[in-house]
Image: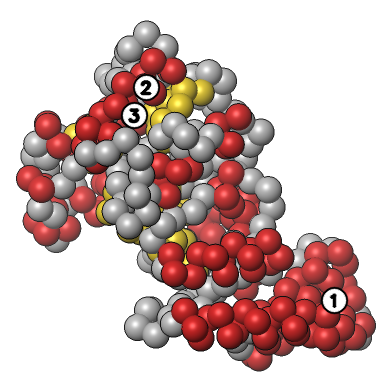
Amino acid sequence: MAPPPSLSTDCFATNPYRSRVPWERTHWFIGDDRFVPPEDPLSNIGMARRLFLDSVGAPRANVHGMPTTDGSPEIAARHYEAELKRFYGRDRLDPARPLFDVVLMGVGPDGHTASLFPRSPALQEKEHWVVGVEEAGCEPYVPRVTLTFPALASTREMLFLVSGEEKRDMLARVLSGEDLPAHHAHSEGELVWLVEPRGCAGGSSGNVTTLCRIPHKSFSHLQKKVSNFFGAPALSRAPAGMATMQFDLELIFPIRDAASAELMTLKAACLCNAGVIDARQRKIVEQRAQRFLGQNVFQHSSAACARWDPFMRRARRAMRTAA
């Protein structure tokens, strides 16, 4: 998948990464694009070519841009879906044989990802791999062509890359489980959120860190069940052999008022019981909630433990079995 331009410029266009990529064996697809010619400044694939694909010598045959001059967005979608199926060698996706090795995603100011916008019918698409989007949900207001959730999910690893102070509040909403497109993105393989601390965690180093890692597809059934209660990052403890996860507690547990303080206290208590976060992290959340709930925060915490303990015991057993 074609990466966001900022990542392309910083990582792929210069050494040491430029010399490490086997360009002749790497194929680049685009997750979504504006319905404009490739030479138009609004074109995603045009920008990727200008910023790094052309300069690094990626073979032209390995760069699979969307045919955004083919009649209409829906016609372009059908043509691109046919190209994906030819490359894949099948007409139906097989979870055991991912279409992609890596899918790079982002989060828009309204919580959209790819060109899957809030309230768009494309969010419910289950059969087509690619669809046309006649009306964009945010600027630039031009038609789009986008891969659907099933096609995006057919990957060994999905990476969400988030940078910029303006994304902080939206990222918190997505990770808290709000009904936004980016929250519903999923992967047959691993799902990893990478956050640039300078923009989203208040740091200044500019380094990209792992905010959270959702386990491999063997955990997908449990992940979905837990996510219904606690949001996308809820089931975040990985099986043995996977990297230890890091949490930005302000993003995972956003507290703005008494209602959110009560909800996040419950969430922290349950995830601590499940072994997803430790007692120190839970205490930090409770201390932040205490500003809104007073001493009652501890009553809320105790009630949460009693309320959800049977469910979390089943979750812990399932995690041990899957690992």
Name the disc covering residue 291, or none.
1
Q: Is residue 102 visible?
A: no
Which mark is nearer the camera, 2 or 1?
A: 2
**Three-letter amino acid code of the residue under disc 2:** Arg
Direction from residue 33 to residue 64 in the image, left or right: left
Direction from residue 71 to residue 107 in the image, left or right: right
In the rendered view of the protein, which quadrant contains the N terminus?
A: top left
Q: Position of residue 302 (x, y in %)?
A: 84, 87
**Three-letter amino acid code of the residue under disc 1:** Arg
Distance between the alpha carbons at the discs numbered 3 and 1: 52 Å
Q: Which residue is mark 3?
A: 81
Which of the 4 quarters of the picture holds residue 27?
top left
Determine the residue positioned at 78% across, 76% down.
Answer: 266
Which of the 4 quarters of the picture holds residue 70?
top left
Callout 2: SS = helix
Distance between the alpha carbons at the discs numbered 2 and 3: 5 Å
Name the disc covering residue 78, or none.
2
Tell me, yes or no, whether the two marked residues, 2 and 3, touch with CB atoms within 8 Å: yes
Which mark is nearer the camera, 3 or 1?
A: 3
In the rendered view of the protein, which quadrant contains the C terminus?
A: bottom left
Q: Is residue 275 above or below residue 48?
A: below
Determine the residue positioned at 53% across, 73% down.
Answer: 236
